[in-house]
Amino acid sequence: MQILYFGRLREVFGRSEENLVPPTNATVAGLLAQLRERGGVWAAELAEGRSFRVAIDQEVATLEGALKADSEVAIFPPVTGG
Amino acid sequence: MQPNVSVAVQTGDFDIAREYARLAGDASIGAIVQFVGRVRDHSEGSAVNKLTLEHYPGMTEKVLQDIGERARVRWNLNSVRIVHRIGPLDLADQIVLVQVAAGHRHDAFEAAQAIMDFLKTEAPFWKQEATPDGSRWLDAREHDERAVQRWFEASR
């Protein structure tokens, strides 16, 4: 499973992508829990109540969104184009 | 003729005269609205020297296409063209073009405004500003969310 980071989160996390095995419950909520366990900026930026979006295969997803081994997951701040 | 929606995401500039010329000779079009968003020299009370735009390749194009298709279904349009630039931009540079062609002005004006409102809240672009105090990522604005909300309210 490929994870992509964009914008301010890419900068704060110090990476634009990484490969992970889907979490046991294979949902966005599970992935976020796993990333928060890294502590530091991960726990702070992805804490509940913080403003960020998750997309699965380039479609905006919810916490219940299902993840597969070949999913492309993106985590990014609220968008600011235009 | 099937109404046409086309999008482009590019580092290079766009030419509004050329975009307009693509519609020349189509006598079914009675109204064309072209909106251009540009890099402003100030934001949230401080000076801006430069702007860099990041995006999510692949998803961006899909979202823009989808926004254009939704506008096409809702208003009576001949064509929708959306061009958005990425990468480093200088002051007064063009950032985004939304061009809407329709039979009548009401459809063209409304659709162009709605497309920009949806683009601002849905299309995966992120702006980083260089200011005299260093660079900063722009925060999403609540009034952009409200702007999009009115199109849902209007359709009830």
Image (cartoon, coloured by chain):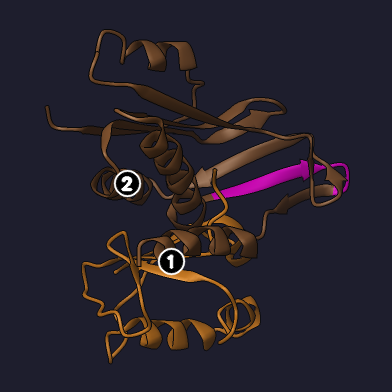
Chain colours: A orange, B brown
> Which of the 4 image quadrants contains residue A66?
bottom left
Measure the alpha-carbon separation of dots 1 and 2.
15 Å
Task: Determine crowd level at label 2: few under 14, some 14-19, many 20+ residues with C-alpha closer than 10 A.
Answer: many
Q: Is residue A25 left or right of residue B153?
A: left
B112 vs A48, nearest the viewer: B112
Q: Amino acid at mark 1?
A: Glu
Image x and y of residue A48, in percent: 56, 87
Magenta part mainly helix, strand or loop? strand
B112 vs A54, nearest the viewer: B112
Discs 1 and 2 lie in a common subunit? yes
Residue B44 in view in this figure:
yes
Residue at 60%, 85% in the rendered image:
A39
In the drawing, what numbered circle is on residue B71?
2
Q: Which residues are magenta?
A: B126-133
Report the label total: 2
* SS under mark 1: helix
Residue B127 is inside the magenta segment:
yes
In the drawing, what numbered circle is on residue B153?
1
Q: Looking at the figure, which quarter contains the C terminus of chain A? A: top right
Are dots 1 and 2 in contact, CB under 8 Å? no
Q: Is residue B92 left or right of residue B133?
A: left
Image x and y of residue A44, in percent: 64, 81
> Which of the 4 image quadrants contains residue B21?
top left
Image x and y of residue A40, in percent: 65, 81
Residue at 25%, 67% in the rendered image:
A71
Q: Chain of mark 2?
A: B
* SS under mark 2: helix
Image x and y of residue B58, in percent: 32, 47
B53 vs B101, nearest the viewer: B101
